[in-house]
């Protein structure tokens, strides 16, 4: 709770030129999503697998009566399926009209970054520019901004 | 949403209801129903649409509705005969009203002179001589402000031949009344209206309804004019409007936006009902206070407006009221406490004196001797009012009951609300669908919890805690009942969507130049509202298809010796837990050769495949399929029938078509009664839970005991009672690995409506239960072979197997592999 209160203060300080991120880790690497998209953070508690989907769709869970799909972010990045345990975390996010969950290793921090500090993703690997909106530096660490629309897209069998 | 937008939204809601009503009434009239009430209903509907349109400034709509209304008025009066020609014009015009409404709703402008043709026809009909069109203002009721008590007016009976408005001004009245008996006589003439003998004119009359209309400031703020309402009322019945202008202040203190007047209106007429009166005030509901009392009853307020403030001497009208003997009147007048400052005393006294039937219900506390009843009547006063008025009477009440002990006079007061508030008019309420849905959802969760609890009850528990078990059984029953009731709230007759179809058929008939009639059966069958909402598009497509492709042109029909007019029958019926909606035509049936050729050409069917007739018929639902080579305006864009299939599937239904070449086509929609709860069999495949709708399961067989055969493609067939049924192994189909041994697995034999059987192989059968269907598409996307999800008692998600989907996609698989 304290963290959230802090945020609100930060928000006032930050104003329109900054955004707040929830930072989480996959392996050693930190990533972030805008805090306003986050609906809930919960521990991994299994999911019902869906037939004939790509491996990064871990299945669906019941979120207070609604069915929410869970995307394994590690698998989405092509680094293999996460061996999820109770210490793994599902971040529930609103992407457009839909609610989805992303499976990550741990949630680490809440960051406030200046919009002007967001770097574009360098040209190169397709996947990087596809899945990331930008890169920010926080405490000299690199944090990749996840492009949620891209994560959710292309889940079908034939794509 | 601004307030105005909200009003608009409500208006458009009402419009769509009213338009449906129009459709329905015209349909009945067309079918030969001569009940004049139908025409009245039509008139009212158009009128309400016009009224709201005026308020929102939809000028085109107002103008059109007005001329339409004029025509209807003529028809209603019998000045124009409702022959088929006029009826057709009326039906066409109500379609145009619908166009105007939808244009207004979308904020579109219809081109100038839209509906002008019809308007011209109206005028030609209403004014065959070409006389000026009747000005809408012409039916103004005549307003003759009559000062109550003015002796000169009172003596002039003529004024009261048509005395729609009386003004009550206490100053004048007091002066006029004085003490003298002959003045009283004058006063009574004032109230006597058109002189119907013996009946006190202001509402206590046996044949007139009385209503009190008290505007609130909001009425004027929303620019409503009471005059218009009175005009409306004068259409409902013979009205007499009495204005109470006592509250009008000196000019100095006059606030133009404040309502100072209130009115008591009496309405006479054979078809005056409370409903019709309330209808007039529909648009100002909430902006005014309205009290309606049936003939023979007067409320306190009404009396007080008519006579109330005037004090004891106002016993004046009494001579005209036979039930009150002169002597008693005098008593009442004498005994009424002069210091009584509020209205109640004089009202009560008057009520008694006038014989107004305040105590219509016998009051147990009062001994029923005539004398005492009279006394009780005299004492009739609302509970809230102080005792003052009744002071002279109590000794006549011998057995004051508990009610009366609060103040002896009130023994009979209990009867008063019954007399005036009799039969509450509210029969239905508008509830936001969201609110109902919330209840439905919660009941759904309750059902889950209850079935989970039941599952937890194993034998040991049953023996040990019998009370608990009994409690859970009761809970199960109550939950069922609750669920049924909630579902009933959401259920609506299919009429609401059926009623849009006649218009469609008329349009189609005129566009295609074919003669088509639509017959509808079972419109009152009720289905869940969500299902109904999803029905409109599929039905439209199906009927278009029937009209466009099914029904042949006149020539062809003649050569086939069919009646010139083609018939499309739309019917709804309940069959078990399902609703069947059937669209049937007596047209040419499906041209199977062409369908198959086209399907092969478009790659829907592999070139070497030879589907059965039934399979070919159902190909018309395949995506991107259309047999008509030239794209017509109506159907044939190739997106029609697959929309039907996908819409119907979305709501858990199925579509089946059966065609008889040369004779006709019959399309059947099978829909679930409710969307929310489904009886299922819970199974598991590779450790994951799946549910199969119970309604599609024929039987289950242990795989070890089943007979299988193999076909060249490698897939298996189940041999059962001489039938060969295709087999789908869910583990293979869903690409999951199962460790279960073949012989321990189960075969679930399924059959969805109109399709062939299908055997599904699962690892384990866990049991039966009720589940609440949840959409998996809401947050994700459509999953092949899965119809949705549900949440089990332990919170886990189970997927619902889409039996039909398994089959169709299997066919697709094969065909795409072959192609």
Image (cartoon, grey):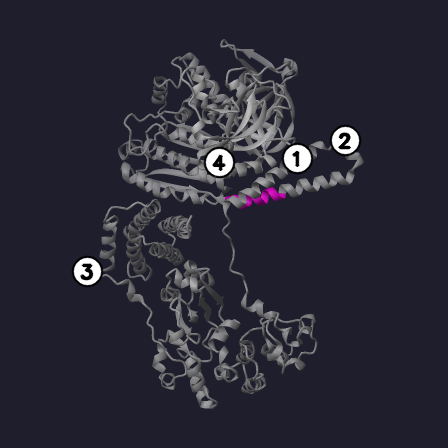
Give the Cα separation between the discs numbered 4 and 3: 76 Å
Q: Which mark is residue B612?
A: none
**Residue A133 relative to residue B476: left or right:** left
Residue A145, above or below B329? above
Residue numbers of the magenta segment:
B481-491
Q: Chain of mark 3?
A: B
User: Is B575 in front, or is B177?
Assistant: B177
Whether label 4 touches label 3, CB < 8 Å: no
Residue B721 x, y percent position in the rendering: 58, 19
Question: Residue B110 at what x, y percent from top left?
Answer: 27, 46
Q: Chain of mark 2?
A: B
Which numbered mark, 1 or 3, is in the foreground of this view? 1
Residue sitting at the far top: B712
Q: Which residue is mark 1?
A: B451
Determine if marks 2 and 4 fall on one subunit.
no
Q: Quadrant of the C terminus of chain B?
A: top left
Q: Which residue is mark 3?
A: B130
Of residue A41 and residue B68, the one placed in the foreground of this image is A41
The answer to whether any part of residue B725 appears in the image is no
What numbered label is drawn on residue B459? 2
Mark 3 burial class by Cα count in 10 Å: few <14, some 14-19, many 20+ = few
Query: Residue B488 in magenta?
Result: yes
Q: Nearer the viewer, residue B177 or B751?
A: B177
User: Does residue B704 appear left or right of residue B102 in this picture?
Assistant: right
Residue B104 placed where, x, y %? 33, 48
Residue labelled with disc 4: A14
Query: Mark 4 Cα within 10 Å, few/some/many (few <14, many 20+)?
Result: some
What secondary structure is the stretch in magenta mostly built from? helix
- Between marks 3 and 2 in the image, the one whose residue lies nearer the viewer: 2
């Amino acid at each position: 709770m304290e963290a959230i209160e802090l945020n609100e203060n930060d928000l006032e300080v930050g104003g329109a030129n900054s955004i707040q991120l929830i930072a989480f880790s996959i392996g050693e690497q930190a990533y972030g999503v805008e805090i306003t998209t986050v609906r809930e953070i919960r521990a991994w508690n299994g999911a019902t697998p869906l037939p004939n989907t790509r491996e990064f769709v871990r299945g669906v869970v019941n979120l207070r009566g609604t069915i929410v799909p869970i995307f394994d972010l590690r698998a989405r990045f092509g680094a293999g399926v996460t061996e999820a345990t109770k210490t793994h975390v599902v971040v529930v996010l609103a992407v457009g009209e839909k609610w989805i969950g992303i499976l990550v290793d741990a949630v680490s921090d809440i960051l406030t970054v200046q919009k002007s500090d967001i770097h574009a993703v360098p040209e190169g690997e397709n996947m990087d520019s596809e899945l990331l909106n930008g890169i920010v530096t926080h405490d000299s660490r690199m944090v990749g901004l996840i492009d949620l629309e891209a994560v959710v897209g292309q889940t079908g069998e034939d794509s | 949403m601004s307030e105005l937008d909200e009003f608009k939204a409500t208006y458009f809601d009402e419009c769509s209801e009213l338009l449906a009503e129009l459709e329905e009434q015209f349909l009945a009239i067309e079918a030969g129903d001569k009940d004049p009430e139908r025409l009245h209903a039509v008139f009212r509907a158009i009128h309400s649409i016009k009224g709201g349109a005026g308020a929102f400034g939809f000028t085109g709509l107002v103008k059109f509705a007005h001329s339409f209304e004029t025509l209807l008025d003529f028809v209603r009066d019998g000045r124009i005969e409702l022959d088929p020609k006029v009826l057709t014009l009326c039906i066409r015009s109500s379609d145009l009203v619908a166009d105007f409404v939808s244009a207004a709703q979308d904020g579109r402008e219809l081109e100038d002179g839209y509906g002008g043709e019809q308007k011209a026809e109206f005028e030609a009909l209403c004014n065959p001589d070409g006389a000026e069109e009747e000005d809408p203002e012409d039916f103004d009721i005549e307003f003759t402000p009559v000062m109550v008590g003015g002796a000169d007016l009172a003596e002039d009976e003529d004024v009261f031949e048509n005395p729609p408005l009386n003004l009550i001004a206490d100053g004048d009245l007091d002066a006029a009344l004085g003490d003298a008996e002959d003045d009283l006589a004058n006063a009574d003439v004032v109230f006597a209206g058109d002189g119907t003998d013996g009946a006190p004119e202001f509402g206590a009359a046996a044949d007139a309804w009385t209503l009190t209309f008290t505007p609130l400031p909001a009425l004027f703020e929303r620019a409503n004019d009471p005059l218009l309402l009175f005009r409306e009322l004068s259409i409902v019945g013979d009205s007499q409007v009495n204005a109470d202008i006592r509250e009008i202040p000196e000019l100095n203190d006059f606030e133009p936006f404040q309502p100072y007047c209130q009115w008591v209106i009496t309405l006479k007429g054979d078809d005056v009902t409370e409903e019709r009166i309330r209808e007039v005030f529909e648009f100002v509901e909430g902006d005014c206070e309205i009290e309606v009392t049936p003939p023979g009853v007067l409320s306190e307020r009404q009396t007080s407006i008519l006579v109330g403030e005037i004090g004891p001497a106002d016993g004046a009208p009494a001579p005209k009221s036979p039930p009150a003997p002169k002597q008693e009147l005098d008593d009442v007048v004498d005994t009424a406490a002069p210091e009584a400052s509020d209205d109640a005393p004089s009202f009560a006294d008057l009520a008694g004196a006038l014989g107004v039937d305040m105590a219509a219900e016998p009051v147990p506390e009062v001994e029923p001797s005539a004398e005492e009843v009279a006394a009780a009547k005299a004492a009739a006063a609302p509970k809230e009012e102080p005792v003052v008025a009744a002071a002279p009477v109590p000794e006549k009440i011998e057995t004051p009951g508990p009610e009366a002990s609060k103040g002896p006079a009130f023994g009979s007061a209990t009867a008063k609300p019954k007399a005036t508030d009799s039969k509450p008019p509210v029969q239905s309420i508008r509830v936001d669908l969201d609110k109902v849905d919330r209840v439905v959802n919660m009941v759904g969760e309750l059902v889950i919890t209850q079935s989970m609890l039941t599952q937890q009850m194993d034998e040991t528990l049953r023996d040990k805690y019998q009370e608990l078990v009994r409690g859970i059984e009761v809970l199960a029953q109550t939950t069922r009942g609750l669920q049924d009731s909630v579902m009933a709230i959401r259920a609506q007759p299919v009429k609401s969507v059926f009623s849009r179809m006649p218009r469609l058929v008329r349009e189609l008939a005129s566009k295609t130049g074919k003669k088509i009639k639509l017959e509808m059966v079972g419109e009152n069958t009720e289905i869940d509202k969500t299902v109904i909402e999803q029905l409109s598009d599929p039905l439209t497509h199906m009927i278009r298809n029937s009209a466009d492709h099914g029904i042949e042109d006149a020539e062809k029909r003649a050569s086939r010796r069919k009646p010139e007019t083609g018939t499309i029958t739309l019917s709804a019926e309940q069959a078990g837990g399902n609703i069947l909606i059937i669209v049937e035509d007596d047209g040419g049936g499906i041209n199977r050769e062409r369908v198959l050729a086209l399907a092969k050409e478009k790659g829907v069917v592999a070139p070497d495949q030879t589907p059965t007739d039934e399979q070919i018929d159902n190909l018309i639902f395949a995506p991107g399929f259309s047999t008509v080579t030239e794209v017509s305006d109506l159907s044939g864009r190739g997106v029609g029938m697959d929309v039907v299939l996908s819409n119907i599937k979305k709501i858990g239904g199925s579509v089946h078509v059966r065609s008889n070449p040369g004779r006709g086509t019959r399309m059947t929609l099978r829909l679930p009664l409710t969307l929310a709860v489904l009886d299922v069999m819970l199974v598991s495949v590779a450790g994951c839970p799946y549910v199969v709708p119970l309604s599609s399961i024929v039987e289950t067989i242990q795989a070890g005991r089943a007979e299988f055969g193999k076909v060249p493609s490698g897939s298996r067939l189940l041999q059962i009672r001489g039938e060969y049924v295709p087999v789908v192994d869910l583990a293979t189909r869903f690409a999951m690995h199962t460790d279960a041994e073949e012989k321990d697995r189960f075969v679930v034999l399924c059959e969805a409506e109109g399709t062939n059987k299908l055997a599904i192989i699962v690892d384990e059968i866990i049991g039966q239960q009720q589940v609440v269907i949840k959409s998996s598409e809401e947050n994700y996307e459509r999953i092949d072979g899965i119809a949705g999800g549900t949440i089990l008692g332990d919170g886990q998600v189970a997927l619902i197997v889409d039996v039909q989907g398994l089959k169709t996609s299997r066919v697709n698989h094969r065909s795409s592999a072959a192609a």
